[in-house]
Structures are given as C-alpha cells and as structure tokens.
Image (cartoon, rainbow, N blue to C red):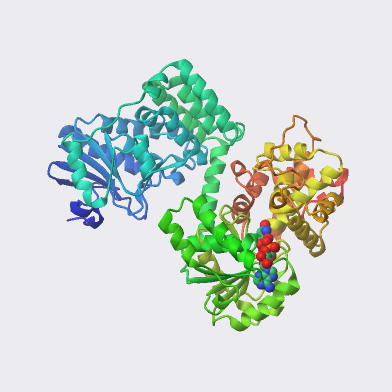
Amino acid sequence: MTGPVLTYLGETKLELGPAEGMEGHPWRRAEADGIVWLVLDCQGSAVNTISEPVIRGLQDHVAALEASPPRGVVIRSAKQGGLAAGADIGSFAGMSDQGAADLLRQGHEVLDRLEALPCPTIAVVHGAALGAGFEIALACDWRIAIEGASFAFPEVNLGLHPGLGGTFRLPALIDPVEAMTLMLTGKTAHTKQAKTLGIADLVTQERHVRAAIEAVLDDRVDRDGRGLKARALQFDQARSLAARKMRSETGKKADPRHYPAPYALIDLWERHGEDRAAMQQAEIDSFAALLDSDTSKNLRRVFFLRQGLKDNARGDDDIAHVHVIGAGAMGTEIAAWAAIRGKRVTLGDLEPDALAAAVRAAASLCKDKHLDGIETRDALDRMMPDPKGYGLARADLVIEAVPEDADLKERIYADAAARMKQGAILATNTSSLRLSELRAAVPQPERFAGLHFFNPVSKMQLVEVVRHDATSDAVIGRLTAFCGAIDRLPAPVTDYPGFLVNRALTPYLMEAMVLMEEGIDKAVIDRAAMDFGMPMGPVALADQVGLDICLDVAESLKSALDKPMPPISDRLRARVEAGETGKKAGRGFYDWSDGTPRPKTDEDGPDDLTDRLILPMLDACVECLRKNVAKNEDEVDGAMVFATGFAPFRGGPMHYARTRGPAEIRQRLDQLAERHDPRFAPDPGWADL
Ligand code: NAD
C-alpha cells in the first residue's frame, strides 16, 4: 500500500509509506537517496499536536535509525499549517504530577536519542513550529526554514514553560538572553528573526528544499558558534545579574503570585543554566508542578473557552462587502479591521475630516499589525471612504456606529433600509440602547441585530452578537461566521440591558466611583482590582472606555433594570461636563498625557474593598444566566475574559464563583447588603448554582 504523495514538498515528491504499526500512527516514513524522511501527519486533524502517540511513534523510528543509520534524517510535517501547534493540551487534563513527569521523561529520552543519532538530522520547517513541535526541531542538528516559517514557545500563556528540553536546548543554541526572552514572552520568531537569532540555519523556498538538504549533508553550510555573551553567561554571577533583570522586566507584566511560570523558568536558568543534566531534571519537575497549579489549569480552561467561542463561528461566511456608517472611534476600527482581514469595506460619515482621519488610522493600524507594504496597500485599497453612502446598495452587511442617540439611529435605519440590497443584514454597534425598541424603525427586523464590538476592535477579540425577539437564526449564523472570518470571537447574547458584558462590567466601574466618593483614593481602588488579577483597575478602565460612554451606559442600565445599581457619582458627571472624558481627552480621573497610569500606593483599602468591586460583577453574570442572556457559564467566562480581560488565571468570573463556592459568595453579598446598601443583595440565580 502506498501513502499519499506530498505534492507541496516541491521537487521532493515523496511517496510516503502508510501509517506504520499501530492504529492512528502519526508518523509517515519515506526513503530516497539514502535520506530517511519522517513526516508528522496526525490523523483526523488539520494540524499536528504532540501527544503520547507522536512520542512513541518517534521512539520506534529512532530505534530503527539507531540500528541502521542512513546518510541523513529529515523531519517535517504533512500539514499545510506547519510542523506542530504544540503539545496536545487536552491530554493534560486529569494527569497526575507523576503521570506527567513519566510522560515527559519518556519524551526527553526520545529527543536525546534523536539528538545523539550518528547521522545528521535536519528539521525542515514550514508554517508554525510551536512548543513541543519547536522542541523536536531543536533536537535535530539542523533547521531549514521555508519562507514564512515561524518558531515560538507559547507555553507561558498556559501557565507553563517548555517541558521537552526547550529550556536548555534553545539557550544552548542561540544567545541565552534572547532564548529566555522568547520563552518568557511567548513571542514568535518569524523567519527572518529566526535566521538572525540562529534558530534557523538556512532559509529557503519550498522548491529548493532538496538542494538545501544536500548542502547540509555535504557540509557546505556554515553557522556561527555561540557568541561572547553566551560564554559570559556560563558564569553564575553573570547569570544571576541577567536573571535579576529578567525578573524585573517580567514583573512589569505578570504578578508572580498569579503567574508563577515565567519566574520558575528564570529560577531554573539561574540555577542550572550551564549544567544540562541538572536543568533537564529540573525542567521536568518544574513543568509537572506547574501543570498541576490552579493558574495553569485555569489558563488552559481559557484556551478551551476561546475554542468554544471560535466554534460559534462555524458556518460559511457569505459577507464580502461591509458598509460602516459612522467613522468615529468604533466605526473606524471596525472598518479598518474588516479591510485588513480581507473584506471590501465602504465607510460613510457626514464629516469629511472623520473619513480622512479614518484612512490615516487604518494605515497606522496596518503598521501596528506588522503588515508589509503590499498587504498594507491591499488593505487600504479595500477600505473606501464613501461620504454619499453608495456602498449601502452593494453591501452584504451594514454596520451602524453613529453616536448613542436612538432618534439619530432610527433615522439612519429608515434611510439605509430603503437603499440596502435584498437579503443584506443591518447591524448596530450600540452599547446600551435596546434593540427591541430600535427595531421599530427597521422594515425587516428579522435581518436586524446587534454586533457589539469592544474598543479597540483590533485588540479586544470578543464581539457580542445580539439577537432581539425577531432576529432570524440564519442572520445570527451569518453574523457569527462573519466574526470568525475577521478573526474575532463571537458570543451570541440576547437583547438585555447592557447585553452581557456591559451589564456585568458597569456595576464594577460605578462601584469604584462610589468608593471614591467615600474618600478612598483611586490608586487604592485600582490596586485592589489589579491585586485580584485585573489587567487594569476600574477607575483607569473607565477612563480608557470614555467617561461619557460609561455615564451613558450606567444611566441606561439604571433605568432599564429592575434591580438597584450603584448611584451615579457626581464626580463622574462633573468630569463629563468638563470635557474630561478620559484617555481620549488626555484627562479623566487620571492624567493620560504620559501614557497609561499605574496606581502607586502601599495603602490597603477597607477589608471588603475587593469584594465590593468584584462580587457585583459576578452577581450580574448570575443574573444574565438566569435570564438566558448567554448560553452557559463557559460562554459567560469566555466573553468576560476576552472583552474585559477578567483575570484569566482565575478562569473567568463564573469559574471563580465556582472555585470560591456559590454559597459563600451569596452569604458575602448578604453581608455587604446589610453593611452598605441593598444593591448588593444576591441575585435569586445563586440558589440554582
Ligand atoms: P463617535 O462619536 O466616536 O463616532 C460617531 C461618528 O458618527 C462620528 O464620526 C460622526 O461624525 C458620525 N455620524 C454622526 N451622525 C452621522 C450620520 N447621520 N451619518 C453618518 N455618520 C454620522 O462614537 P463611537 O464611540 O465610535 O460610538 C459609536 C457607537 O458605538 C455608539 O452606539 C456607541 O455606543 C458604540 N460603542 C462605543 C464604544 C466605545 O468604546 N467608544 C464601544 C462599543 C460600542
């Protein structure tokens, strides 16, 4: 039986042998001109992930190669996407420390044997080599990168560090400080950087792979040895100094109490940086311990929450042309992002200046997103300023993003509906108006829905896809598929005041302002939230969102909900009246002229400060579940993490509630209600958790 021919291998055109031995064997093998090709091809999946069968399969092949070494061994992937997307994260679930350590030891043994083969071993990498995939490539003698290849250790995002030898093989290969930076940040080394750093020995195109392999085997490729810096870092003192600097840099981004993995990695390197055997043992023990930590379990949960939201986007995207009405803060970003992601976009506004500014902002977004010259030109070509709204007649989707004024929006809908083509969808980006009221102005309400993006669209991945009582399922399906196509995460929600995210976030922001009225310093409030794990405190966040927008949303929620909300603070109104609306005005509660403010204080607030901020947010999530605003707890958690940055290491607000215990939280809310105000009274939904 012959296996498939890997046509994309260019000249190589190998006939690959069948999956060998056991059912589901992920490696395929071919031999030509004395070279053995081991091609990773995990079955039943579009991408390779490194799992126990991959390691066991490699073990079998390595044993055969030891017995009869060929002229050379090439490792590569049969998947278009790349070598591997990292370890199979799902397989970690339920694994004990001991089980993980045993599996890791087995993996280490195989990679050590691969490394020790007497013949040259070459990893040919196209696409992404992530995590354990990168580690397999590092165990080879040589790495040939095909243009577009990239290498990264994203483990830190899952509360882990590399566990299959990456912690010692990468620092042994390239400048150890650069190696540590890659592992500590999870950042990607794209082809050019990978070559500069020394990760890739050669960069070539697919059609020249065979020639590149021959050049390596004929010893015609030079590579630089480890530099001076690497030699200096062999000394403990130099490493300690560098480790101290790494700790301080890492401390700016990750609190060691919440994110222990990067600090564990720095400790490993400081202690064992030049003793490979000790480092190997320590890496296995440290990885197994981190795997069992709550942080890593919760971050892996967040990884799956993202997958769950992505799954909402399944279905065919049939939106080719988007027309955006309103080139303000949101409309500009929505239009630019959709154009970058390949959509044809027309953008309308009454103000020519707004359209000109939108084009400039789009160009700068392309730069931020590292688009090259051609990609930038193509994205900007796809985004057309359209002051007369000609695009309305051709668009498959019209997104309205004009100021939060129901009369204005309704007038726009009447005009747009008369000009839109048959079957097109009308969506609003409103944050706080009720769709059930706005829809009265729309002739075909089944094709009207909310598409609630978060600011800035290019960074905040979530989009709430809001249905009202007449929106058709087909329209929701088309909108979620559209979100997937532009690489955003859709959370379908119902038309509830504030939908899910603003309903939950607003009491948190407003409570912060009540606390300020009570005389607590804003830095103390913000620090309490950040100590809990929020990326930014509520006062700074309100400034970032825009105090005018916060006020709008708070007023609208206050009138629409049948529950008490925190009173709207006079300070908030005063700032808005003075035009001090936050980051966009350069000043709100904080001065933003020197960038993002950092709360500096050693003072602790009252003992119930954190609960006063966080528990009302949890309570609103429980209310939304009770009212079926979101499908389930996972969707609530995913939405809150990806729209607000809710402490990812806690796994989301509902997961935090589950961990702390619903009964305890309910009791605490009762206490807060008694001590402060009935607005803290627990939602009846807690009783069902
Ligand atoms: P904005 O004031 O920055 O921009 C609105 C734009 O609409 C302006 O450029 C204005 O000239 C234009 N406009 C006004 N009337 C128009 C008309 N008749 N035809 C065409 N254009 C017109 O507002 P924004 O902050 O971008 O908010 C837009 C919408 O998005 C609002 O519904 C808001 O609630 C919602 N939203 C805002 C944020 C945020 O953080 N800013 C987040 C999520 C949702």
- Point out residue 440 in the picture as x, y percentages from the top left corner: 71, 79
Q: Is residue 314 among the parts visible in the rendering?
A: no
> Along the horizontal axis of the image, is 243 left or right of 201?
right
In the shown orientation, is residue 320 left or right of residue 437? left
Q: Position of residue 465 (x, y in %)?
A: 60, 65
Compared to residue 81, the image places residue 68 above or below, namely above
Residue depicted at x 72% and y 52%: 585
Q: From the viewer's perspective, is 674 left or right of 24?
A: right
Q: Is residue 285 left or right of residue 276?
A: right
670 or 146: nearer the viewer: 146
Give the residue displayed 47% in from the left and 41% down from the top: 187
Is there any visible trace of residue 26 in the rendered image?
A: yes
The residue depicted at 65 percent of the width and 82 percent of the height is 443
Quadrant of the image occupied by residue 254: top right
**Number of callouts:** 0
> Quadrant location of residue 105?
top left
Q: Determine whether 566 is above or below 404 in the image.
A: above
